[in-house]
Every structure is written in structure tokens, then in C-alpha cells.
Amino acid sequence: MLCTGILNRVGLIASNILFLILQACGGGGSNIALDSIQPPTFPPATPTTPTVSNPCASYSEHGITRQGQVDGVNCVYSSLFVSEDSPLSVDLTIPSIKGLHIFEATLQVGEDVDTGEPPDGPTLTIDAGNTLVWINKDDYLLITRGSKIQAKGNSSAPITLTGYEDAVSDTAAFDDVQLWGGVVINGRGISNKCSDDQRANHTCHIQSEGKPSHYGGNDNADNSGSLTYVIIKHSGSEAAPGDELNGLTLNAVGSGTTIENIQVYSTFDDGVEFFGGAVSVTNLIALYVNDDSIDYADGWVGSVNNALIIHHRDGGNRCVEADNQGSVFDAQPHTNATINNMTCVTSGSDSAKGGGLGTHGDSEGILLRRGVMSTINNSIVVDLYANEKGVNGNECLELDGAETRIHAQTGATSINSTVIACDEVAKDSLPNGTSVAAWFQGGTNNLAIHGNGDAALDADIRLLTGFYTATNFSDAGGEAFTITPANGASHIGAVTRANDWTEGWAICLRARASEACGPWFL
């Protein structure tokens, strides 16, 4: 009986083990047959559905979690996730994904405040390599006063901000504009549109372009975060009726903000526009900007260092347009900005002659007006690749208005170690009767070369190789010359082949054999 009990308890054991037990129990002394032992049975497995993780950005607020929805490899964010009516009030990270982050409304970071002192707001972090897409033409990215953006791409994984037709439907032409709004950053810096009392008493609230939001304050060291290795494409749509946005609008943004390696590509209005503040930009590419590539006013006192500007073959307005203030030319504090190492390639497009796109006027070089002060160093301004050979005559340097010309005459405005090679080098005269062209020529290490807008006649002028600063310069007569850079710089112009900071991340700068959207002269 003992052996029989053992056998009953080991009915699930394999037959070879069972044989050993039977041997231990006396061999054939048992009447139990091996074929009477049945294999074990198990309940059927419960079917399970594989868990699909959601990689989209999410945040929690007031016990409610909001997250983008997965659409294939893309993440889609509705107006319930974020909009101007439902702005972010907590920190948000846009994580790296294989696809795109698609927004159905304005991505507004922080509440807009138009009374009292603006509080600190949330931070938007965008991981390197991401592409953010806006579906609606009147939507954009807005960073409010006190909030921050941390968009830190790198040379191998830049961050791209663009419109639906470019990134999703793939129906955009290389030079299409106004597919979405653009980027607006509102800061707490100083604008000469506010008085000292307003700044001191926190009543400086200037309404920005686009949908109503406000900027201004008393802190030119304000920190709105970082933009590094960011490409802004196909922007400039109307965010409000008759009010087009720029590629990048910097409203009273402070010097604590880091903006480096930025490309604004195919935008309808300005490339980068500064309204007061003290932020500086290093390594800027403005390619196919319909209006002004660099525009500044209202007391901005920052700098642009290394600016490569190339107009569209059939369009573009000015490489630089600068004002003190639009209505009060002597407003304080003065706009007093610095541009170091700019390469400005105009197209020769002339809207007055009916040629080119002409959406904002003629393709020109530098316009200083309305009482502005400026310092421009180590730059090259050329129309040597102009598309209207022999007929272009758009000026490459203009000082407009008595207040502006007085600043040049007194030395408050200066241009140094710069070459201008254009059919019309400059226009206007200073109050003392000196022509602007002669004033420019009298600057430190400056040279004016009168090109003819004709490829054959301009062939001896050597300033650029493509968009790179040439290693050796020659004038219209083929005579070699040198320019000593100011402030200890190693070269004039924005980019050299030996130090190509555009390499690896910027778009549409290579020869058309490899990039169909590349400049017309490559």
C-alpha cells in the first residue's frame, strides 16, 4: 500500500523515473500498469494583447495627464493638448522619436501677462534631432515672458521647425513660404518703447506681432533659454490679419539667452527681428528670406556674429534693416547694435522693374535709418552673382535720415574692415556734405569696389568662392589686395572653407547637383 501511494503521488513523473520507483518497491509486486498513468492537464492560456508604448510628449496638471496620440511613427497634439487658449503651465519635454511631432494649434509656453511683473513660467525642452510640424498656417511657437525654451540640437542632429506641406504631405516647393507662423520669444529686456518709470514700475507691456502677447521689462540680462542648431523653415504666415510673423522674433530678449547655429530658410517676412533687449546671435544663416534678413530696432544692444545671408535669385529685400524707433527717432536708450563677420549676397532683383518676386522691395545690402547707431565689422556685401546682369543698380549701403547720418558723421556709427562690391556702392550724403560712399571708404580698412553687374566685367573681382570667403582677394582690375580684420578676427566674411560652421547641419547650401534647393550660383 505504501508503494501504491507513492505511485499515485508521482503520476506526473516520467516513465524512466517511475521504473526506478517500481524497482525499489519490489519489482513486479505491484498490480499498477504503467499505461494507466495519464499526463497532466493545464488550463488554456489566456490570450494577451501586446502593449504598445506611447512615446509622445505628456504632462500632468491638476491630476489630469495629457499626451499626444500615436499616428504610425508620428505624434499628433490636438488643441486640447496645448494652444493659445490652453497654454502650457508646467514643464514639457518633446522627446526624441523616429517620426514627427505634429501640432494642430499654437504651441504656447506660459501664460501671457499684461499687468504687473511677469512671473517665471514653464520650460519647453526639445530633444536633439526632433522635427516639429504645424498644420495650420496661422499657428506658431510662442515663448511668453518668464518662460523658457531649451531647444538644444547638435551638428549631427539639428532641430527642425516647419509646416505640414514640407514635412508630411511633401508638396512644398523649395522656396515656399507662409506654411506656418514662426518662432516668437517674449522677454523681460529693455525696449525704448517704454519709459524709465514704466520699466521700474512693471507697467511696460508691449504687444507683440501676431496674436496678442506682451513683452518688455527692465532686465537686459533676462534668460529665455537656448536655441542651438535649429532650422526654421517655410515660415512667415499671418498669425493675425495683415500681420505676418518672422522666422524668429526676439522681443526684448535678454543677454542671458543663448542663440547659436540658427538657420532661417524660405520665410515670407524677416529672417530674425530684434525688438529691444540685449540677446546676441552667433552663426546665423538667412537663406531665401523675402524681406529683411536681419532687422533690429527699439533699443536692441546685442550683436550678430557670423551671419551668412543669401537672397533668393528672384527676391529678397535687405540683408540688414535697422531703426532706432519707428516713430521717435531719438528714443532712449538708443538702438546700438554690432554685426561681426557678415557675408551678404544680394540677388539684384528689382521690384520696380517688375523682375523677380519683389514681395517686399528691391534686393539691397544695408539700410540704417530712423536714428539708429550701429557698428559693422569684417563684412562682405556683394551683388556679383546678380541675376539681372548689367541692369541692376540697387544700393548696398544706405544711411537714411538726418539723425542716422549725424551718428555716422560723429563716429557713433562705424563700418570697419569691410568690402562692398556692388554696382551702386552707397547712396546719400552726410550733413557735412561727405557722400556715404566716401565716408565708408574713409573707414578703417574698408574698400568699395564698383561692380558692373556683368559676369564678364566682374570676373576679376575675387572676394568669395561660392559663399566662402576667398583666400586671396582681387579688385575689378585684377589687382590683389588684403583686408586686415578688426578686433583680432582671423578673416572677414561669415564662413571660410577651413572653418565651415555650416557643415553637417545646415540645409540647401551645397551645389545644386547635390541639393536642388542650393543657391543659384552654385
Image: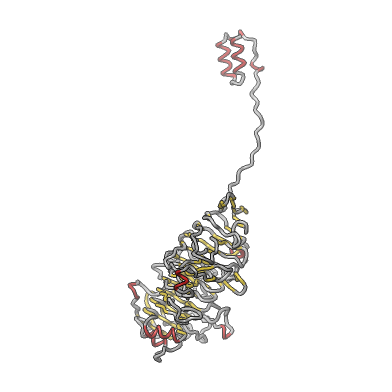
Q: In the image, is residue 180 above or below residue 484?
A: above
Image coordinates for residue 444, horizontal then vertical, percent: 34, 81
The foreground one among 153 and 202 is 202
Color encoding of the figure: secondary structure
The foreground one among 398 and 334 is 334
Image coordinates for residue 421, horizontal then vertical, percent: 43, 82
The foreground one among 341 and 337 is 337
The foreground one among 15 and 332 is 332
Query: In which quadrant of the rendered image does the N terminus lie?
Result: top right
Q: In the image, is residue 103 above or below residue 317?
A: above
Q: Residue at x 35, y 71 (%)?
A: 490
Q: In the image, is residue 380 above or below residue 115?
A: below
Q: Residue at x 65, y 33 (%)?
A: 45
Classify residue 89 by image quadrant. bottom right
Image coordinates for residue 105, horizontal then vertical, percent: 61, 62
> In the visual, does 342 lie left or right of 81?
left
Q: Is residue 283 visible in the rendered structure shown here?
A: no
Classify residue 496 by image quadrant. bottom left
> In the visual, does 43 lie left or right of 449?
right
Image coordinates for residue 80, horizontal then vertical, percent: 62, 57
